[in-house]
Amino acid sequence: MQTETINFVESLPNLSIEEQLKPYLFEVEQREVGYGMNPTSIFPKNNLVSTSEYQSIVRADNNNLISIMPSSYKMVSNREVILPVLDFLDQFDNKWYVDESHSFVEDGRMKLQITFPDLTVSDGDSDIALSLYLHNSYNGAEGVRSFWGGIRGICTNGMVFGELLGKFYHRHTAGINIDQLKEQVITSTEKLPVIQERINILQNLESKPEQFVAIEKTMGKKISNYVAENYDYTESQWVLLNILTYYVSHVIDKRQRSAYQMHISKLFNF
């Protein structure tokens, strides 16, 4: 299935944010599921036996089947996740924009990155702007999730502050409470000093042997080899973190980056 990425920077300035996000906001429907053949029916359209145990999730605009889910699945549309958050952000004094660098959308899943260019920390070489990552799926891959992270200006390295800032997770089994997510936005934007302090600490910590064992175990041999080729083992943990985030941001497919970014977050308590 083709993944669609949007270059928001080059979007026409007269387009509203909803128009720019149109690929994310396609309508979805929950429909009945049928299976097998009904031997008592002589009408072809009635040949399928309906079931209440499952439901289908379908794109309303083109009737593409996205997934078959249990009847307990409570669909939360991308629209229900994205637009309330953006409306809420419009109430803030801080600037924000939808960032294409780590955003993607496909029928079954999406990730939307929102970057705050004025909310930054620094490692001495580059500003790192705070970013919010919104996730959703229609295929059971994940629930509604949000993570906080940053984009390093000098190389567009994406990183997740999963250990330092709050996370939001909602399973598709009950109605979403968007107020919880809004509250997280407020509290997380106030914690930049915590992130800055952790950067300062990592810049003064030497790497540990067990970190390289963990890199290969959790992220694989290719990344481990890349580190071995590009990291001077006398350098700081912050340098090591940026080598890892560079690889993930520029080599790993957008659909798979979040898992790697969370491994890095845990590895460095970041």
Image (cartoon, grey):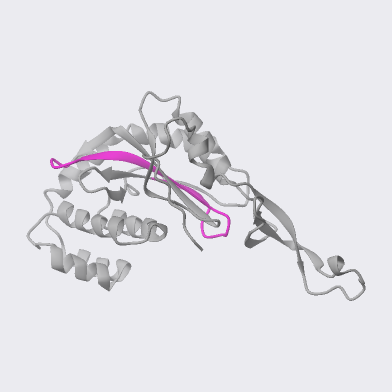
- Residue at (51, 63) in percent of width and height: 1
User: Is 199 in front, or is 159?
Assistant: 159
Magenta stretch encompasses residue 136: yes
- Residue shown at 50% from the left, 41% from the top: 21
Evaluate whether residue 208 shows in this view: yes
* Nearer-the-camera pick, 142 or 20: 20
Q: Residue furthest left?
A: 234
> Could you say where residue 157 lies in the image, as x and y percent from the top left?
26, 50
Is 28 left or right of 104, judged from the image as shown? right
Q: Position of residue 22 (x, y in %)?
A: 53, 42
First to last magenta residue range: 123-147
258 horizontally vs 221: left or right: right
Question: What residue do we see at 40% from left, 41% from top?
Answer: 8
Q: Residue at x 39, y 61 (%)?
A: 256
Classify residue 18 as left or right of residue 133. Answer: right
Quarter residue 7 falls in: top left
Residue 185, how many percent across, how many down? 42, 35
Tag count: 0
* Residue 83 shown in magenta: no
Prevalent SS, magenta region: strand
Q: Is residue 166 visible?
A: no
Residue 83 percent coordinates (x, y): 53, 36
